[in-house]
Amino acid sequence: MQIRQTLQLFFCALSLALLILSCTPQRKLVYMQGDQTLIPDTSRFAMPVSSGDILLVQLAAVNPEAFPALGVVSANNEGNDSRSAYEKGLVVSPDGMLDLPYIGSVKAAGLTLEILHDTLVGRFSRLVEDPVVILKKLSFKVSLLGEVNRPGLYYVPNEQLTFLEALSLAGDLNNYADRTALRLYRKTPEGTVEYTLDLTSKAVLSGPLRYVYPDDVIYAQPTRKKAFTAITPATAVVTSLLTAVALIATAYFRSK
């Protein structure tokens, strides 16, 4: 009788342990927790230019025929260009230079789009009075990997994307993602830097990591819940065998 009770306690403890391992506390699932309603944001977004970037440089002019070698925007042709980004854009060379018709080479890598735009306006001012220069980055892409609903490489249609907006591109995190320790890998001139973000904190709404930059890689690592789910079939087999042994042992001791 004592052995039977011991076996029953053992299986109750085992079931309770498996239940605890399979559960994820709610505090690890809810985004941006906290009582603060106003999130001050002193960070300033500045899109950097790097070697290998594809940039669109256009000059808005009344007489576009005067600049046939440059993509010039007029009221008639704006929005009708169906070429790919590579065909429309200019590639920043490995040494960081941007070669343009009429104005020559311009140092681009290491500058922000805003500073490069002002530089191009100054150069074109030698040819056109009060030029209107359009400058866009066509090679803005981010990678979302791990426990997201649609992992993959995503091209961003604009030049300002927040971390939360990037996650929405991949359909948000799935149920197995660790929301307290997302990894962000960012290229810098010194090398790749790794950051850790906690989506359960409102700190993700402000600061330098609020925005995603070109070629960022976001990795959502799994929680222990996924590992438990992966071993569930094997666990079920072991549990069934233990149950059978317990039933046989119980029947044996009853017969004594």
Image (cartoon, rainbow, N blue to C red):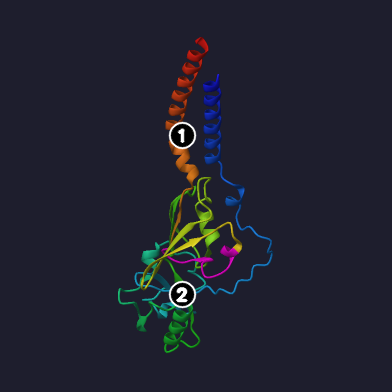
Q: Is 106 on the left-hand or right-hand side of 251?
A: left
Label 2, label 1: how far apart the Cα atoms are: 54 Å
Q: Is residue 7 above or below residue 77?
A: above
Which mark sits nearer the N-terminus, 2 or 1? 2
Tell me the quarter of the picture where residue 164 sits. bottom right
Residue located beneath label 2 in the image: 135
Q: Is residue 214 magenta?
A: yes
Residues shaded magenta: 203-216
Query: In which quadrant is the N terminus drawn?
Result: top right
Q: Nearer the viewer, residue 68 or 164?
A: 164
Picture coordinates of residue 251 (x, y %)? 50, 13
Q: In this view, does 245 lie above or below 21?
A: above
Q: Nearer the viewer, residue 217 or 103?
A: 217
The tag on residue 232 is 1
* Amino acid tagged 2: Leu
Q: Does the magenta stretch include residue 180?
A: no
Mark 2 surroundings: few (<14), some (14-19) or many (≥20) residues within 10 A? some
Taken as a whole, is the magenta stretch helix, strand or loop? loop
Determine the residue positioned at 63% across, 71% down.
40
Q: What element carries label 2?
A: strand
Q: Nearer the viewer, residue 165 or 148?
A: 148
Determine the residue positioned at 45% across, 32% down.
235
Determine the residue positioned at 44% across, 38% down.
230
Picture coordinates of residue 114 (x, y %)? 49, 78
Q: Is mark 1 on a helix, strand or loop?
A: helix
Picture coordinates of residue 4 (x, y %)? 53, 21
Q: Is residue 153 above or below residue 133?
A: above
The tag on residue 167 is none
